[in-house]
């Protein structure tokens, strides 16, 4: 019989483990497509076209559906949907972000 590090049978431990599902997507910053939300944390000023604040409504929508952001990184998207990370040293700019989310599917 296998035991967990907590000294209980491994099958009992596995039944109690949380399980997750994952979702990945690209998010685009563009004030022409998504309005910058106004709040105490975000000043009511003219924002640049690719303001990162336009990510907030998109992230909140996913959060309302139970998705928790676990990683976000600026990327460049190729013609075939391929992604590459942006290298600050190269001087390349992007308005696309690769985001990874998780949400709980089971609590034992």
Image (tube, helix red, strand yellow):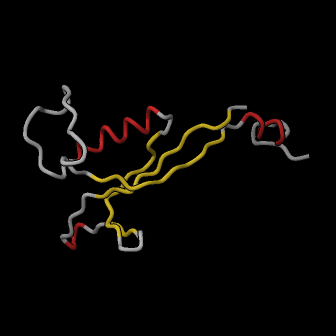
Q: Position of residue 45 (x, y in %)?
A: 8, 36
The percent position of residue 55, horizontal first and vertical second, equals: 29, 44
Residue 11 in the figure: left or right of residue 44: right
Asked which quadrant contains residue 80, the reply is bottom left
In the rendered image of this protein, does residue 82 appear above or below residue 18? below
Question: Farthest residue toward the front?
Answer: 33
Which residue occupies the foreground of this view, 41 or 12? 41
Q: In this view, does 14 lie to the left or right of 9?
A: left
Judge whether 82 appears above or below 26 on screen: below
Residue occupying the point 22% across, 34% down? 37
State the residue lying farthest toward the top: 40
| Closest to the observer, 61 or 107 | 61
Q: In which quarter of the image is the C terminus?
A: top right
Above or below: residue 76 compared with residue 22: below
Q: Position of residue 81 (x, y in %)?
A: 41, 69
Q: Which residue is drawn at 82% across and 36% down?
A: 12
Instruction: Describe residue 14's horizontal placement relative to residue 60 as left or right.
Output: right
Nearer to me, 91 or 54: 54
Question: Residue at (47%, 39%) from the top-left corner?
Answer: 68
**Quarter of the image holding residue 44?**
top left
In percent of width and height, residue 70 lies at 45, 46
Disc tally is 0
Q: Quadrant of residue 107?
A: top right
47 above or below 79?
Answer: above
Residue lying farthest right? 1
């Amino acid at each position: 019989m296998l035991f967990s590090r907590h000294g209980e049978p491994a099958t009992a431990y596995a039944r109690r483990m949380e399980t997750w599902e994952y979702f990945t997507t690209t998010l685009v910053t563009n004030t022409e497509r998504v309005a910058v939300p106004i709040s105490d944390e975000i000043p009511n000023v003219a924002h640049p076209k690719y303001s990162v604040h336009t990510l907030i409504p998109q992230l909140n929508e996913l959060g309302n559906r139970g998705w928790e952001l676990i990683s976000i990184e600026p990327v460049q998207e190729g013609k075939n949907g391929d992604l590459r990370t942006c290298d600050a040293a190269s001087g390349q700019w992007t308005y696309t972000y690769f985001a990874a989310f998780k949400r709980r599917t089971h609590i034992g």
